[in-house]
Image: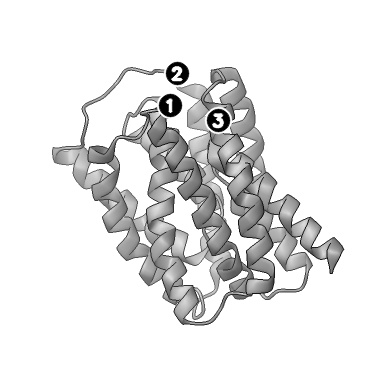
Amino acid sequence: MFVTVTVLLLSGFLGGFIGAQVGAGAVIILPVLLFMGLPLPVAVATTAPAGWLMNAVASVKYWQSKKINLRFVLPLSVIAAIGAVVGAKLLFVIDASLLAKLFAVVFTGLGVLLFVKPESNTRTAGHLTGGRLLLGLILALILGIYGGILAAGLTTIALLVFNLVLRQPRLEAVANSVLFSALLLSTSLVVFVFSHRINYAFATPLALGSIAGSYYGAATILKKNIVYFKSLMVLVIIGVVVKLMFF
């Protein structure tokens, strides 16, 4: 039991540390739970408390650093939260493997775009309007449904969408994607709690580890440059794609 708790604490810490910077904390945590014998739907539900906490704690750190743009992220989060409820209910009635492979392709395309497109920290308008708002809401709904079903790499893909598609500066995209995920995952977490799908013996040490990891992760990325960001991002994208392809 001691070994199991230690592994879960360390997994939660590492997932929180990476997840607070570029997302994909669940990609680190989920394989651990599957290796320990949890069925996929239960493993996904059990990662939800840690996933929510790591994003919530990191959001506080980013808010203190004035990197979060509420006018941008709140409308997207509301729509995504609705999608997350739908996705969380679909998790137990559909084959998630096809969706995982589809998003593996999406991740690959966004990853290539990240390295082809030059870095720009030009600040855009404080909120989305017109066609960009409509595009943002559609993408947020899709991300919400995906997040409710799998959540693997959710923050990462939101980050890439905010930065590359909706034209947010890098650090602001990181901060807003973390808050976006925290708000989205709060709704799917409620569904998992009331459907009694969470294994709390595993979820508790994961959540405790993720709190510490996410705080230090957010503090780290705020001090780093684009080279560190892209290096970490490529490792995470490779990990997410491999994980999704073999879901």
Look at the image and tell me whether residue 145 can be seen: yes
Task: Tell me the residue at 49%/66% (across/down).
Answer: 149
Task: Tell me the residue at 43%/74% (across/down).
Answer: 191
Q: Which quadrant of the view contains residue 220?
A: top right
Task: Tell me the residue at 49%/51% (across/down).
Answer: 154
Measured in 3D between alpha carbons, the distance from the residue under mark 3 to the one under mark 2, in whole angstroms, is 21 Å
Label 3: which residue?
219
| First along the sequence among labels 1 and 3 | 1
The N terminus lies in quadrant: bottom right
Q: Which mark is residue 170?
A: 1
Label 2: which residue?
119
Q: Position of residue 82 (x, y in %)?
A: 31, 64
Q: Which quadrant of the view contains residue 95?
A: bottom right
Q: Residues within 10 Å of mark 3 (few under 14, many from 20)?
A: some
Q: Are marks 1 and 2 in contact (CB under 8 Å)?
A: yes
Q: Which mark is residue 6?
A: none
Q: Which callout, 1 or 2, points to the residue nearer the camera?
A: 1
Q: Are marks 3 and 2 in contact (CB under 8 Å)?
A: no
Measured in 3D between alpha carbons, the distance from the residue under mark 1 to the one under mark 3, in whole angstroms, is 15 Å
Q: Secondary structure at mark 1?
A: helix
Measured in 3D between alpha carbons, the distance from the residue under mark 1 to the one under mark 2, in whole angstroms, is 8 Å
> What is the three-letter code of the residue carrying label 1?
Arg
Q: Position of residue 41 (x, y in %)?
A: 59, 74
> What is the three-letter code of the residue carrying label 3?
Ala
Q: Which callout, 3 or 2, points to the residue nearer the camera?
A: 3
Task: Tell me the residue at 49%/81% (across/down).
Answer: 93
| First along the sequence among labels 1 and 2 | 2
Q: Position of residue 44 (x, y in %)?
A: 58, 67
Vertical comparison of 161 with 224: above or below: below
| First along the sequence among labels 3 and 2 | 2
